[in-house]
Amino acid sequence: MNPMLLLMQANAFTHFYNPAAPISGAPWLWFTILKLLVVFTVIMVGVAYLTLAERKISAWIQDRYGPNRVGPQGLFQPLADGLKNIMKEETYPDGAYKPLFILAPMMSFIPALITFAVIPFAAPLHTRWGYVTMSIANAPIGFLYILAITSLGVYGIVLAGWSSNNKYSLLGGLRSSAQMVSYEVAMGMATVAVLLLAGNVSLEGIVEQQVHSGWNAFPLLIGFFIFLVAAFAETNRLPFDLPEAESELIAGYHTEYSAMKFSMFFIAEYSNMITASALMTTLFFGGWSVPFWTSVNVAPWVWWKTLITLIAFTIKVVFFLFLFMWVRWTLPRFRYDQLMGLGWKFMLPVALGYIVIMSGALLVLQAVGIAPDARWLGFVPVYWAILGILNLVLAALVFVVLDRGRIVSPAYSRIEAARIARLRARSVRSALTPVEGD
Amino acid sequence: MATTKRTVEVALGTSGIDSQGRPYRAPVTVQENGGVTTLEPPEPIEPDLAGEHMLINIGPQHPATHGVLRLVLELDGETVVRCIPHIGYLHCGFEKIGEYRQYNQVIPWTDREDYLNSIGNNVAFALGAERLFGIEITPRCTVLRVIAMELSRIISHLVWLGTTCIDIGAFSPFLWAFEQRERVYELLESWVGARLTTSATRVGGMAADIPNGWVDKLRDFLRTFPKVVDEIDRVLTTNGIWVGRTVGLGVMTAEEAINYGLSGPMIRASGVAYDVRKDFPYLDYETYDFEVPVGTNGDVYDRFLVRLEELRQSTRILVQAVDRLPDGPINTSDHRVILPPKSKAMSDMESMIHHFKQVMEGPRPPIGEAYVAVESPKGEKGYYMVSDGTAKPVRWRIRPPSFVNLSAIPKMVEGHLLSDVIAINASIDIVMGEIDR
């Protein structure tokens, strides 16, 4: 399992092929490269068709047709869009800081793509050289890797906002950095509960745990909710798309971008969506496991199990992608202070309290002696059910006690007339200060 | 000779860049006895911790300013410290052009000022001209004009609703609203042949009668339209984010609203039940059964609720108007303003003279002046015209509700955040064609 160990084995030529053991040696290398290529291609094509799906779904919600001119039912529309973006002229604003202006789209594009590397997307594939885990890198620190890499995406946005030398871009970049940092905290906290339950930060391990003791979505309902909201904020999608709020900031941080560089931000956004959906699937909805058909989810591995689990994973991910779009075309946008308030005053305390309560509950269950895979009457998953009911109670408390008006507060933030007068006096004073050479 | 010259506002609008690349504004100068002295800066009231303020231009080219409004905002962080609206980017001189046009020729210009309410403007101008001429219109024309006014109110409110949704980030209701607007435009197209620039009225009547089957199409619209309003109501009114984004924003108390001269949904949201249709009825509005929705807080949310309810009340008026639509001519029989039929003009001496006079020099009102105010979707819309007895008005003046309502924007946005500026600006429901004229 350890990549270093595998590499050492590969170099020493000391292995022999065992179909029941993990793949190693030269076949491991070839399969990894193959997986790399396949996953990259699938994500890029997926992103292209997500843009089409977004337009089709929005059209469906808004009683119109959507793109239907290029190819049958508009199926070649992403192709045409891509071609257009490649052929368009790249423009550079006069005052832009060019090195960072060029670097910024890449810095947001690359983390978005490489986060997918550790997500297992199917059951291991059986080959004559050993079984192949269906994630590009089966890293034991999978989840920590994801947290680390997704945080890097914010650099691209901040640098894009700053280097454009545009006030709207700058405001977009500032908002985005604040937003992503705030929600990352809540997101990380929400997943701690998953890690507690799984006792593992490897995503393979988390999937395996869910195969045995049921999906985490029910026993960790609040954790899932917080993760879901944070995922929307992390991907800058409505109702959290403040960094690019078009009605206020034109296009936010990518106002000054054109052609392929603009396209890169677009690809980054959509591949972030794919990663976030895949992550929600993996952490809370059993990853690639198929519900109610346990024999598919466990060894011995055969090729059709890989295929079926891949389909199951795809269906789950597509559902979350649809959810992203559904929400986008339904809800209005938060205001900046509401967004911050929601992140810091609601999500973070709830996530922290939730960790405490869940670890307490896990300890109690351990002390009482209920094992995670215990079945009452042979089929009722006790452990799963108890935690789930606890979560339902907590959810009711959270949503009843903290009613809507408190979570998303209306505009009481207006500063009073006296303070405006003071600020104005200051601004007049700075205007009055004699300027050299005036 | 002591002359005082203050250049604060001008300097703010045209800031320069100093040697460090920072924006600055020209100093305030007081010119006394021919000499220039710079004012002493006021005493610092609080330590200058936050650094300089940022000037940001919202418009004239910005996706969220409706039309070519330009707002110069002075931001402390994201808080608006000062807001100065600049207008005039769409100035066309409609009122001056009107002085060189006959009364019926002015009507196309009224299409183009508040272009979301063009048929309503046509009606309002015709009402003013008829008051000047001193003529009565036929019963059928009166009801048709009520239908025109209310249809145009529906169009205007739908556009307002849609664009406000976009400004606050909800895209879908925009297209739901625009689909209904399209249906109204189809009705208008089959009536007067144009969608946006209708020019539907003439002094003393209408340009055209409604075609056969039009009433059924209108009834069909009135039956299905309230469902869409209800749908938008369901999606937005109790939506936590929508409420959070609009409640408590841009509050105008009833007193402030009256002092600023606001009208229309703006003043009604503040709790003042002022509606020209009720208070100074025209076109027999007093005989229709409808209610004037009134808000309590005068914030953006109340303005939204008031306009949503007005959509329903307009539908109610339209249902009554369609039911009472009488048969008969649409034009008055007064041949000083309406051409006699061609056959009569060829056989009857007096008709021929009327025809000749109207074609050659246009209808001529008596010397005098007239002011007519109607309840346009934006508020109290007034047309004032002065006649010296010739066929062209010596002065034609519009009282644009958007312009007066817009004057309150600095009062409403200062102290709020940048995002709120967009929501408040949207809630005023401005049309720059009407403001700049």
Image: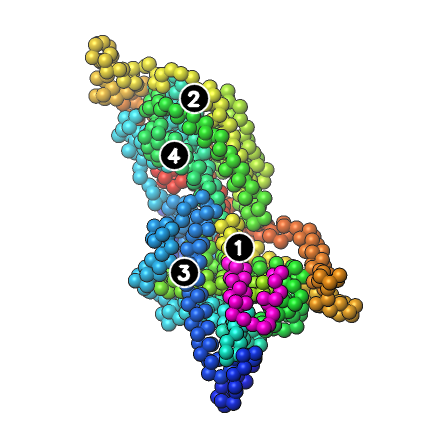
Please give the range of residues in magenta.
A291-319
Q: Residue sitting at 43 percent across and 52 percent down?
A: A55
The residue to which callout 3 is attached is A48
Please tell me how crowded label 3 is: few (under 14), some (14-19), or many (20+) other residues with Cα within 10 Å: many
Do tags 4 and 2 sit on the same chain? Answer: yes
Disc 1 is attached to a residue of which chain?
A
Q: Amino acid at mark 3?
A: Ala
The residue to which callout 1 is attached is A323
Please tell me how crowded label 4 is: few (under 14), some (14-19), or many (20+) other residues with Cα within 10 Å: some
The residue to which callout 4 is attached is B185
Residue A300 falls inside the magenta stretch: yes
Q: CA distance from mark 3 to mark 1?
A: 18 Å
The secondary structure making up most of the magenta span is helix
Q: Amino acid at mark 4?
A: Tyr
Rendered image coloring scheme: rainbow
Q: Is residue B12 left or right of residue A191?
A: left
Percent x, y for residue A385? 71, 60
Q: Amino acid at mark 2?
A: Val
Q: Report helix, strand or loop for mark 4.
A: helix
Q: Report helix, strand or loop for mark 1.
A: helix
